[in-house]
Image (tube, coloured by chain):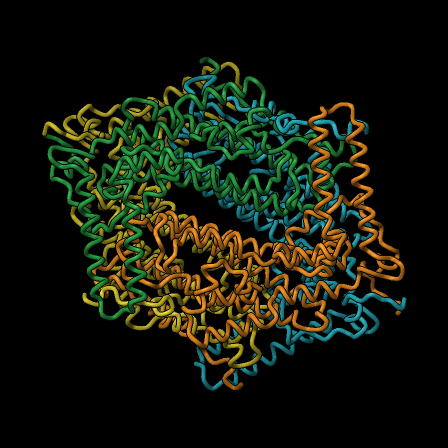
Chain colours: A yellow, B cyan, C green, D orange
């Protein structure tokens, strides 16, 4: 405590001896120094530093949600930290442009020296994926089988432990399930919403059918659009259908959590639901950004290696493209858009609930 | 000519009466004004303005290439103009973030009034696609059948005429085919390159096989990587294979043009090939950016509509995702990366050709 | 109402005849068509479209704040709309890169035909500036005198009327002044904060003075840093000093509003202050983005024209650089950073106030 | 050599033990761990890694130019490497957004522990500045006096040695001075250019004076614009004036190099001048990007600390703002825009020179 304010120099604080002394070119060691190997090393080190920060922020948010009751004042902080992760992700995506200044011919000057090192061996990235909620069986086939092997026993154990515990997905799901506004006195959200959806569809059908100024072809199209919409609602109206979708791997989020997320989306204009709504939006953005990163990463690998097999033993391009499509965690939150109805059709909440959803200073309490 | 310097006011020069008088909210006309409809109109108008500029630049470049001999001084201008298009594309991609500030619930406030208007009906975007070289039969099934119907007869005719003429793809292909460096006196690029590839593969195989310090498993992997590489070269070594790939739709670029593009990539360090190399890179970037734009566009539609059928009658998300994968024009240029070999393995060019590929002032001429 | 769902085509909905028919090259009219004039026209039209959207969003937010009591549920919407403006601003800034693809030599091909048109004549941009709160006397000298002259009488009147009414700055100031948490029962924020600041400074001074491990030189520096900090607090501790700074033009925001903004910043972790805190942050971002835009705009003009006098009759570079520094509206909000103290030093709020600043459902009410 | 292909794991290749083991929170050591200190450390480490890459690329380019005759095939590589630096700079600028997610209140949680560490102590950044060509006496006053003190003796000596040697500015200046096209047989660029400028001005004056359709006020303005333009040319027409400007610190680039840069800008459409032109453009971009980075950096510091004195002992904001304006190196290249004249007014080059500026294969040689 006495040394609280001991002086420190920028160089020592950042431990720059370590940081700037960690670039050793394999091409220089075993052959002719390849100018671009420096970039290759440095950009990957930068990625790893950012992964460390992402883990730091994500872990802190997970701790906030790993409680019986999430502290309301933590929601704002959680939003700010996930927002930070998304800002970092934008940099992860944009700095692919820097790596793209290295051409495939320049890469060939040192590629042979790197075998079998591969971004696939990034332990920290696996940790982020698992912490978010990616399960082994959800990984694309290739990764399921081998992805553990490239890590040390200690790392493997930690990954397993992380996967066995509560992921961020699990914690968000529970928090949604505990949301108290689905039922109050004799108001029940779900039947009211169902009724609103049915009314809306019936009105639309009538309006379209009776419109004199559009062609039969277009009427049919519009009715088909509506009709298809109807089927979209099926798994909301029917919990068994939802369970079935989960069993088939078409959905992940529990029925109850899904309904809460729907309610938050529909009634987000109430002050008390605003922060939860913003939080869900940030989670979607987090998920989408990793998808975009994988997509851009795949695009970059294609430009660098063509369809050649990557240093990890797979065609980097195919592998990354596939993970971009399949390694999403929170797509259920995204799909809620399908279930929204116009504000004008929203069932009115009971006065008591509206009151609770507003701020008030309760001075008379 | 006399009026050359007549005064003009910013407002009149930009015809702002037209530009700023072209936002009429359908929601205001037929119901309650929806605040976000303004954004929806304006951002699409901005897209259309940029499409006009892209067409303007692309057309000018196509004119430069639509000649027996492309003027060397035009290559620099062509690069600059395609670079401009790529800068515009980055804006097209980034401004999706602006549209994403409109939430699906806000969109529902006016979506019904827009039917059946759809971005699918953007005539200018079709023009760009066709001018670049997208053929009707290469479009994904849905579009093949209906995409003409949404345009006026005049527009349909222009699109057909554009498709029948030389696309940018065709012009670049011809320019590559005319490249003079594939053969000179008794030097022939292709056999020399083949020999180099074979040597390289043989050396690598020997090195791997005799390495005492890596596991048999890893040896096998490395040999497999090499072996697979061998097969990649097949269609370069064998013109019939290349023709077959074209017939199957796996390649588009002619054999001769492909070999020229390969040569440019391999010997780009020679001053005379630098500009062609930069040009090919810019064309790839142009192609990739449209792919990224479609991808991000699909992502945005998913967030807005879920998997609902879009105003155009298809699931916007599925349609856009599929075009992102299939509507590429210049992927052959991208795939050349597969064929590159390290500079140290490159066949030496004959002195005379090297001389021609360098700048010199030919003062004695 | 009957025609509610009448069909509309994308082309007509966006009024593309107007939008795409508004590019007339002066170089083509009076001389040789200059390829890049198209870009020049289009990018300025795009800017004007975005200014229209910014005005649309800003006006809607101002209406929300132009009330005795701001509706709590509007705060979330206001944040979302200002966030939209900031996303648009990022595009305004980034698309300068597109204009930078036009070189000065290319600009010279048509620059003479544009006189005296100038971005300075953008009426919409003036409207945004005035609506935000820029007063005539705060404009840099050059603009004060002439900026009205370039507009029509009608436009001039509207600008004057806008300036005479409540600007966004005025509305935010009032909203802050009405904030109820500065005083409650026998708790008063300001004295408590003063005491905390004094304690903090005293402790720091003692710690520094007694530290045995740092040089005298560094001690002096640290004490100077602290001492200077002391002076920063002067105008918070003393309302007369604050008034004096306003008179001198060093501050704009009223004393009471400033103290509220300080409180919001310090206690933002309480749920009820989170949204106000986020809102203030977004307002700062809005202000900063215009500054960055002016700065980048100046940089671009320098590259295009050097230090030549612009079409508006001033050196565009000097004018824009100066406005970038002086035309800020909300720098007082930014300067609050100077007044913050560590969370550990924050005065504890009374229980009753803490209770009010938390969410609760008041079910017993 | 035998071990050429020894295996390496991603983790070891990137020396992640060092990289990821270099984050030690001072707040955790001396008090309560502050969550955001991790970000603070990591982002600065990322900056330092990028500075290392920038130095690596810049040094390699300087070596290419540190020769009697610059190898033509190196120009393309130099452009590509400077382009890489500019892509890195964009990331340096954009990732300020990440640091801005840390609020001033969060910074206060650990700021006291960092004293007197400061970004001002970044040795690598000084190296980049000095290598580019910033001289001690050109630094703003504050830095001149103290900037050496914060480094070790070894570092100070290296900086001095670097400053005494040829900077990138010096090397580019020499390369420009050697440019061979200013004089050939009886053609001399400078008199021809002077004549063209005079003709152009005379024609413009006549046209303006005789125009019947613009007001006298506007005529006067236009003539003033022209007249002012005339003065801009003074230091090109008169080498003594140029020397005087250098003595006054208004210009840095030698007269001869300036004239060459002007010629390159005017005749860049000739193939042989294209690459030099692109190179000069990239150098300007490099310079501008550092300016933008300093500007954004200052803006960020203002938001974080207000006008408080920074850890380095100066008001970070004031210091950074001032360097943003004054620490430019290549502004002379930027100012050439002032001297350009329309293509239609360009003096025709002699046939022989035109011939040399075009590519040709000299087959008859």
Please name whichever residue, C169 or A183, is drawn nearer the observer in this view of the structure: C169
Residue depicted at x 50% and y 35%: B314
* D281, above or below B14, in the image: below
Q: How many labels were placed on the picture?
A: 0
Q: Where is residue B313 in the image (x, y as percent from the top left)?
A: 50, 31
Q: Where is residue B263 in the image (x, y as percent from the top left)?
A: 70, 65
* A32, above or below B3, in the image: below
Report whether residue A240 is seen: no
Residue depicted at x 46% and y 38%: B301
* C332, above or below C69, in the image: below
Residue depicted at x 55% and y 83%: B207
- Is B252 situated left or right of A50 in this image? right
Q: Position of residue A228 (x, y in %)?
A: 41, 32
Report whether residue D197 is seen: yes
- Is A318 situated left or right of A154 in this image? right
- Write down the quadrant of residue C329 in the picture: top left
């Amino acid at each position: 405590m006495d040394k609280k304010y001991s002086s420190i120099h920028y160089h020592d604080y950042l431990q720059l001896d370590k940081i700037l002394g960690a670039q050793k070119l394999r091409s220089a060691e075993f052959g002719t120094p390849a100018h671009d190997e420096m970039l290759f090393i440095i950009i990957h080190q930068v990625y790893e530093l950012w992964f460390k920060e992402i883990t730091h922020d994500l872990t802190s948010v997970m701790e906030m949600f790993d409680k019986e009751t999430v502290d309301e004042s933590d929601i704002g902080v959680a939003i700010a930290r996930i927002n930070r992760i998304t800002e970092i992700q934008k940099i992860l995506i944009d700095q692919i442009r820097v790596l793209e200044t290295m051409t495939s011919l320049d890469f060939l000057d040192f590629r042979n020296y790197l075998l079998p090192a591969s971004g696939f061996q990034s332990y920290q990235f696996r940790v982020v994926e698992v912490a978010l909620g990616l399960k082994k069986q959800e990984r694309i086939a290739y990764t399921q089988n081998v992805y553990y092997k490239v890590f040390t026993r200690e790392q493997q154990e930690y990954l397993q432990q992380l996967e066995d515990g509560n992921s961020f997905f699990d914690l968000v799901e529970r928090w949604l399930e505990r949301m108290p506004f689905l039922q109050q006195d004799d108001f029940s959200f779900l039947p009211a919403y169902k009724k609103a959806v049915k009314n809306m569809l019936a009105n639309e059908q009538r309006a379209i059918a009776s419109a004199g100024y559009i062609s039969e072809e277009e009427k049919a199209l519009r009715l088909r659009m509506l009709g298809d919409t109807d089927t979209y609602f099926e798994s909301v109206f029917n919990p068994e259908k939802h369970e079935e979708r989960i069993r088939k791997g078409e959905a992940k989020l529990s029925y109850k959590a899904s309904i809460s997320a729907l309610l938050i989306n529909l009634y987000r204009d109430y002050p008390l639901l605003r922060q939860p709504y913003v939080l869900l939006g940030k989670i979607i953005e987090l998920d989408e950004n990793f998808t975009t990163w994988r997509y851009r990463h795949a695009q970059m690998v294609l430009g660098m290696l063509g369809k050649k097999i990557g240093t990890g033993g797979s065609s980097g391009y195919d592998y990354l493209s596939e993970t971009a499509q399949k390694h999403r965690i929170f797509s259920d939150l995204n799909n809620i858009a399908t279930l929204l109805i116009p504000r004008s059709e929203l069932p009115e909440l009971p006065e008591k609930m509206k009151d609770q959803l507003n701020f008030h200073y309760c001075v008379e309490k």
